[in-house]
Image (tube, grey):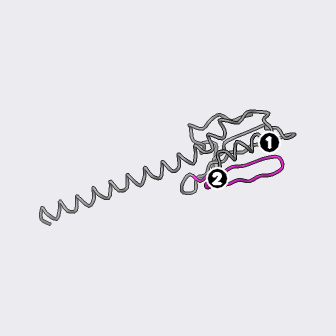
Amino acid sequence: MDRRELLGQLGLIALGAGFGLVIREFIFDRDAERRFALYNIMRELRKDMTRKEVEEIINRHDAPFISKRIEADYISLTVSLGGINQLYLSMKFAEEKLVQARFGGEDHPDDVPKDAPSNIE
């Protein structure tokens, strides 16, 4: 391999590495947007809010990547964080009042990002 071929190969490697870094940043930024959609909802929640107030907050922050499961006594919101990782925001109600709001991860409490707002217990 002569010097010219070597420089060409190194150039391709550098280009590939640069492209990989750009793609990685795009993926992390996407995940941040998804996480922060749930974080913004949680930051507005207060214990003993009415279910109607909670639903208004959710509707204000609605996004196509948020999956919702709505039942009589709870609401669960889910966003995908890339791959198989998901972040859940579960809200429980008693007598139409919010009594609990918690973040959950895929399999373990450590799956919840460290920058998540505090749970409401």
Which residue is depicted at the point 81% across and 41% down? 93
Q: Identify the secondary structure beneath mark 1.
A: helix
Which residue is depicted at the point 66% across and 48% down? 88
Image spot of residue 121 (x, y percent): 74, 34
Separation of residues labelled 1 and 2 (CA atoms)? 19 Å
- From the viewer's perspective, is residue 52 above or below residue 11? above
User: Disc number at residue 66?
Assistant: 2
Whether residue 79 is in magenta: the answer is yes
> Which of these two is toward me, 9 or 93?
93
> Which of these two is toward me, 111 or 29?
29
Mark 2, residues whose alpha carbon is within 10 Å: few (<14), some, or many (≥20)?
some
Residues rendered magenta in the picture: 63-80
> Which of these two is toward me, 105 or 117?
117
Question: Which of the 4 quarters of the picture holds residue 99?
Answer: top right
Mark 1, residues whose alpha carbon is within 10 Å: few (<14), some, or many (≥20)?
many
User: Disc number at residue 51?
Assistant: 1
**Label 2 sits on what residue type?**
Ile
Q: Earlier in the sequence, mark 1 or mark 2?
A: 1
- Main secondary structure type of the part rendered in magenta: strand
Q: Quadrant of the N terminus?
A: bottom left
Q: Are marks 1 and 2 in contact (CB under 8 Å)?
A: no
Question: Which of the 4 quarters of the picture holds residue 54?
Answer: top right
> Which of these two is toward me, 38 or 11?
38
